[in-house]
Image: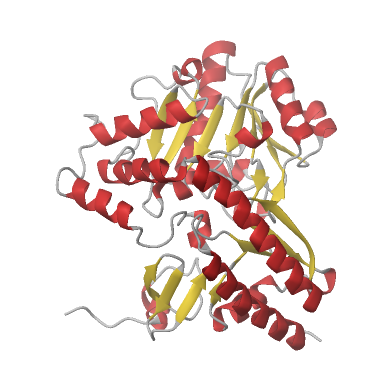
Amino acid sequence: MQASVNRETFEQVMVPNYSPLPIIPVKGKGSRVWDQSGKEYVDFAGGIAVNALGHCHPQLITALQQQAENLWHLSNVWTNEPALRLAKQLCDKTFAERVYFANSGAEANEAAFKLARKFAYDHSGETKHEIISCLNSFHGRTLFTVSVGGQPKYKEGFEPAPKGIQHIEFNNCQALSEAISDKTCAVVIEPIQGESGIIPATDDFLQTARSLCDSHNALLIFDEIQTGVGRTGKLYAYQNYGVTPDILTTAKALGGGFPIGAMLCLRTVAQSFGIGSHGSTYGGNPLACTVASTVLDLIDTPELLNAVTQKHEIFSQHLERLNKRHPIFHEFRGQGLLIGCELKEEFHGKARQLLQIAQEEGVMVLIAGLNVIRLTPSLIISDQDIEDGMSRLTRAVKRFQDENK
């Protein structure tokens, strides 16, 4: 018999690096979730842009079950068919010519940053090692990735951090032009900054980054952990901008909830990861790759990707109506089903309060920093689920507004 557990159990057995909300979800179906008490929620959080096809999608379940009966794990002493199929899909659908598999977005970024330095070392020597990133960016929680990320709070207490990294203002072409040099090995950009508030890159900034990288023989890396796999209405957000990177990282939605990450790159760049230069015990796991392959089959269709754009408009209309009735938001931003709702200045610092009230009203949302409510629902969320969720969010916003008069 399994032991009974509740939210208090977390305090007794878990490392306190998280502060989860009081409920414990136990079941999900589509865009609905139920907690231990049986209460239902509409899920606008999507596991932080992970559950791109909702909870318990039947075709993902079937794919996982079938693979589980054949092969779970080998290690990279051997390759396996699901990994090869998935790598070929990713190459066929993107600019990429080579793929490296990992278990998470942080691991994919770790690989990308190491590869950028190794490529520069191989072709230009040890002095070409500097990485340029953006202020307020987020690239993961390993020591290297928090150092490349532009939020000092995440590396506080963990120094000394890796050196040779500088940060510039996001969307500032002049700052990038002044920072880049022949010592730069890579420029790393999120096409939409996620954790800092859902802030899209400008066309000019990404085009300038591409041009400057070409001029200085540096690699352009796009972190598409959150924006990838249909989230913005294209398979990857770079396809919205017409700017092609040398390396792209992807995770989150790639597995539809099953842990997997990948680094995509050009063949010439990939050569610097020779045998033994990098690795991952579970990277390319047959179970994960089978699920991810099915995710790509389901998401990368004109019908689904067009529907993401249409659902963005539905959300936008609901949010505008909500804000007319209860004007607490300064603006709405984002692309596709990655939507940021920034609170007005008088409500700054209170995004988590609104998140908690929303949960009480039966809708799951996220925050992106202290001032932004983030919506990353399933890409196939139904119009009825949007309607029901927005009704619950409207009630939550009214309560929030009343409590902060």
The location of residue 85, given as percent across then percent down, is: 31, 31
Regarding residue 160, the answer to whether it shows in the image is no
Nearer to me, 172 or 379: 379
Q: Nearer the viewer, residue 99 or 237?
A: 237
Q: Is residue 365 left or right of residue 347?
A: left
Residue 171 can be seen in this image: yes
Say how the picture is coloured.
Answer: secondary structure
Judging depth in this view, the residue of 386 and 187 nearest the camera is: 386
Identify the residue at image location x=43%, y=32%. 90
Residue found at x 37% / y 82%:
36
Task: Name the residue at 24% across, 29% down.
Answer: 79
Q: Quadrant of the C terminus?
A: bottom right
Whether 45 is drawn above or below 177: the answer is below
Q: Looking at the figure, which quarter contains the N terminus?
A: bottom left
Q: Position of residue 157 (x, y in %)?
A: 59, 56
**Residue 381 location (% of width, % of height):** 50, 61
**Residue 45 position (above or below residue 115):** below
Q: Nearer the viewer, residue 205 or 216?
A: 205
Give x and y (percent) for residue 30: 42, 65
Number of marks in the image?
0
Relative to residue 281, is residue 213 drawn left or right?
right
Residue 195: image quadrant is bottom right
Q: Name the residue located 55 percent from the left edge and 43 percent from the top edge.
A: 145
